[in-house]
Image (cartoon, helix red, strand yellow):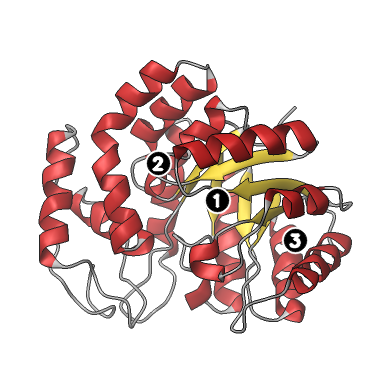
Amino acid sequence: MSLFGPLVAYVPTPLTPEGEVDEGTFVVLVDRAREAGVGGVAVLGSTGGYAYLDRAARRRVTEVAAEALAGQVPLMVGVGSLLTRDVLGLAADAQDAGASAILLPPMSYLPLTEAEVVGLVETVAGATTTPVWIYHNPVTTRFDFSVELLVRLSAIPGVGGVKDRGQDTDGVRARAQRLTAETSVEVGYSGDAFGYHGLLAGAVSWHSGLAGVLPRPYVAVAAAAASGDEALARERMRPLVRLAHLAATAGGARVVHAVGELLGLPVGVLPEPLLSPAPDVLAELAAELKAAGLSAARTPMRTTGSSTSH
């Protein structure tokens, strides 16, 4: 039986203007995803701004999320960091706090070699009893996993899943078909616009940042795709496609925060030096939300990270 259901929502980490985690509003976001019927909640992914938080803040985020979910929904926790020793500390914190799975991106300043990534996965998977998910996100990590390497890594004891991605619909389907046929671990796909095609090709989960602020419509798309109804999945996805493409081009964390603001959600501020999307993008986001029948509260001002504005 799979640990995660069809949709894993990546919840943003709300920050105060002073840069502290706003725990109360964070619980609101986690509860909102749970109540929408997600098959998993993820924290400290790209949408959760993990790269901008210190170890203490990241541990607290995990603790608060685990307490809010109370075992009702599985919790995935990102542990990305530049140094292996720091990743190990974060993984231990996540396990102690109640994570159901650990999400491991191969973070780097200098691009990592294949041997270095293999060593990282072996080390982390060998140091924790919590299942490790390998995270393929070349946009932020600058490491591009081949299917062959993911198959090889999935055989390492302690690896419980792969969060893969493709550059387009055909790529997602082709990779998903191979991974599900050649591995015995859970296979999930990211991509707010077309990751659901992984479900249609046999993957067990779709991982979405926009679902952190739009959980109900994304749950509906995932449910249709998981049942094999491609026509219904496409129909339900249609109002979200442009939002997803804006997230890909303007930056997922920026757009998720902007959408949250437009919906009147307590998403906090972006960490400096990040800025809200440009005014034309904000206007288009507001228009797309309105066209999709989602309540748009207001158009956020384009500000620095120290002003109310992932």
**Could you tell me the amino acid type at mark 2?**
Arg
The residue closer to the viewer here, 201 or 70, is 201
Q: Residue at x 31, y 59 (%)?
A: 249
Does 233 sit left or right of 160 as displayed? Answer: left
**Could you tell me the amino acid type at mark 3?**
Asp
Q: CA distance from mark 2 to mark 3?
A: 24 Å
* Mark 1 surroundings within 10 Å by alpha-carbon count, few (fewer than 14), some (14 through 19), many (20 or more): many
The residue closer to the viewer here, 164 or 8, is 164
Q: CA distance from mark 1 to mark 3?
A: 16 Å
The quarter of the image holding the C terminus is bottom left
**Mark 2 highlights which residue?**
32
Does residue 150 appear in this view? yes
SS type, badge 2: helix
Residue 178, compared with residue 112, is above or below; it is: above
* Mark 2 surroundings within 10 Å by alpha-carbon count, few (fewer than 14), some (14 through 19), many (20 or more): some
**In the image, residue 138 lies at what x, y percent?**
54, 63
**In the image, residue 277 lies at what x, y percent?**
22, 66
Of the two numbered discs 2 and 3 on the same chain, state the one appearing first in sequence: 2
**Mark 3 highlights which residue?**
96
Does 212 sit left or right of 112 as displayed? Answer: left
**Mark 1 highlights which residue?**
42
Q: Nearer the viewer, mark 2 or mark 1?
A: 1
The quarter of the image holding the N terminus is top right
Q: Residue at x 70, y 39 (%)?
A: 179
